[in-house]
Amino acid sequence: MTQIGIGILGGGYMGKAHAVAMSAVGAVFDTKLRPRLEMVCASTPDSAEKYRAAYGFQRATDDWQALVTDPKVEAIMIATPQDTHRAVAEAAFALGKPVFCEKPLGASLDDSRAMVAAAEASGVPNMVGFNYIRTPASQFARQLIADGEIGDVTWFRGEHTEDFYADPGAPATWRTTGEANGTMGDLAPHMINAALALLGPIARVMATVETVHTTRPGGDVTNDDHAQMMCRFDNGAMGQMYFSRIATGRKMGYAYEITGTKGALRFDQEDQNAIWLYRMDGPEATRGFTKILTGPAHPDYLPFCQGPGHGTGYQDQIIIEARDFLAAIETGKPVWPTFRDGMEVNRVIAAAMASSREEAWQDIETF
């Protein structure tokens, strides 16, 4: 076993999740590289010190450049707002340090392209944080589709819906300002990534992006509340996706349905330890969707629990990501999703935004 010094930028929601994951990953997966929480960076000295003490880091700073350039910090994890991603990543790659960046890759497609260029020029490992697709159930869904268990896929429906802004009286915050913080920048990337992972590249999109509550207590809203998108995949399948932060009653509505010529799949993140499978086999009278509870027979389940149906949780998805990032560093081989994979999500989003503005289909290859 070899220690590796980890530096995490951001100590809030995702910063904490990644700190916990790096503390646990060695025990869960018996990784050859064992993370050492070397330094955390936050916006003020007080908050940085608070996170250091709470999560077990060796040191704290409010200067991201100090973290990136520190010789004891050997790998960088970016868990800060999107508009900070590019500068941090470029600085880290210039020093030959591996980078894990939370989604979306950049605040814009131009940022993403620049980050991919820096990553590939450096030749060092890079990953983007799309955690939901790493549940044992969704990994199993990818296997079923790849193995042809539901035949040729003809249709995909996906959504990422939540209701944290369903109340029009909820106050304006940083989340209601700037395109990168809207629904297309925040929630849509996860489901677009799922669509790409499950069905492959998207060829064309037609989208409508809307702001429903244009003002909130404390200020105007300058980004989108929800959006719908039709798409055509390279493999010919039709698709439809919906993204919303005002979907009343939905808490973690990352869900998809996939229809094939021999069967179908359904999944809902609010029941993340189950997947529904339909096989077009046997007498019509006995056909129906079967609920499959995940267990040790499914990908990345056994390291967490030996009991089928006992389930994994949100934090476990982040630990799986940590395992994959460490594997990329150890082997020097790319682990999906790389920065280039993250950029593909940004391309779809850019095309969808253009489609909404121009009220016309957009080809992804032009972005």
Image (tube, helix red, strand yellow):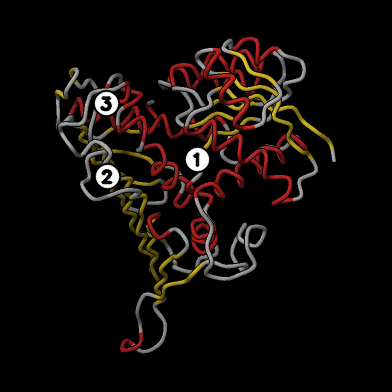
Mark 3: amino acid: Ala
What type is the residue that disc 2 sits on?
Tyr
Of residue 90 and residue 38, the one placed in the foreground of this image is: 38
Picture residue at 49% right of the left edge, 23% below the top: 80
Q: Earlier in the sequence, mark 1 or mark 3?
A: 1
Q: Residues within 10 Å of mark 2 (few under 14, many from 20)?
A: many
Which residue is the site of mark 3? 354
Secondary structure of the residue carrying tag 3 is: helix
Label 1 SS: loop
Measured as percent of width and height from the top left, residue 306 is found at 64, 67
- The residues tagged by marks 1 and 3 sit, at their Cα atoms, a distance apart of 24 Å
Q: Is residue 123 visible?
A: no
Residue 151 quadrant: bottom left
Up/down of 150 relative to 135, above or below:
below
Residue at screen point 34% across, 27% down = 350
Camera-near label (3 vs 2) is 2
Residue under label 2, please give it.
242
Residue 220 is situated, as x and y percent measured from the top left of the image, at 18, 18
Residue 283 appears anywhere in the view: yes
Q: Work out whether mark 2 precedes mark 1 in sequence or the reverse, and give the earlier one.
A: 1
Quadrant placement of the C terminus:
top left
Name the image quarter holding residue 174.
top left
Q: CA distance from mark 3 to mark 2?
A: 17 Å
Circles 1 and 3, Cβ within 8 Å, touching? The answer is no
Kind of residue at badge 1: Phe
Tell whether 191 sits left or right of 308.
left
Circle 1 sits on which residue?
130
Q: CA distance from mark 2 to mark 1?
A: 18 Å
Q: Quadrant of the N terminus?
A: top right
The residue drawn where x is 53% and y is 15% is: 46
41 displayed left or right of 198: right
